[in-house]
Image: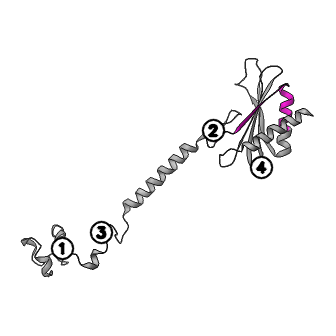
Amino acid sequence: MWPAAVTRRLPPRYRGEGSADNHPPREARAYRVISPQQFSQSELDALVECDCMTSMKLKFFAGLMAVAVLVAGCVNTVTGGRTAGVPFIKDTIEARYDKPAEPIFQAARQVINENGTMITEGNLYGQTNALGNMVRTIKGKVNDRTVYIRVEALDPRITGTSVQTRTTAGGSDIDLAAQIDKQIAIKLAH
């Protein structure tokens, strides 16, 4: 039997014994009196965690990861490829030399071999300039950084170089790019 305080608030049809487990039907439960011990615990503080909170946290985390991927993205390299990295940061040092392209390419190859390891070297065939000069490229590893070098003859006497560096996390190491560019210039002076 329900306590008198509760049964007075129940509608007349529920003032009997209740259901088999001695609880009033669902419609009548809204009329129950809450004891002070029960009042201190909010209905939001359930003993069993709600599944909707877990799925909401998962969706929020997935959204954050999607934004991080979009912000990080891919960047173009001076060798014509793409790599994962943070866009919109300075990562390339460009220089021009009053020499033909072949000695500059050999100096760049020596600098990469002295400071680290060369991964690839090659020609970019689809990117010849108006004079028909090929673009030569080098990719190497120096101090756990990936270094990309592009050597392009702008005209028969002037050659342009671009040195780009990327860290394993996708950031830029502009100081290393400047150092490699300076070492290429020193090699050409000897």
Q: Is residue 4 left or right of residue 148?
A: left
Q: Amino acid at mark 4?
A: Asn
Dot 2 or dot 3, earlier in sequence = 3
Q: Are marks 3 and 4 in contact (CB under 8 Å)?
A: no
Residue at which label 2 appears: 75
* Residue 25 appears in the picture as rendered: no
Residue at which label 3 appears: 43
- Label 2 – label 1 distance at C-alpha: 64 Å
Dot 4 or dot 1, earlier in sequence = 1
Please give the range of residues in magenta.
Answer: 84-109
Q: Secondary structure at mark 1?
A: loop
Q: Is residue 34 highlighted in magenta?
A: no
Q: Secondary structure at mark 4?
A: loop
Q: Residues within 10 Å of mark 1 (few under 14, many from 20)?
A: some
Q: Amino acid at mark 3?
A: Glu
Q: Quadrant of the C terminus?
A: top right
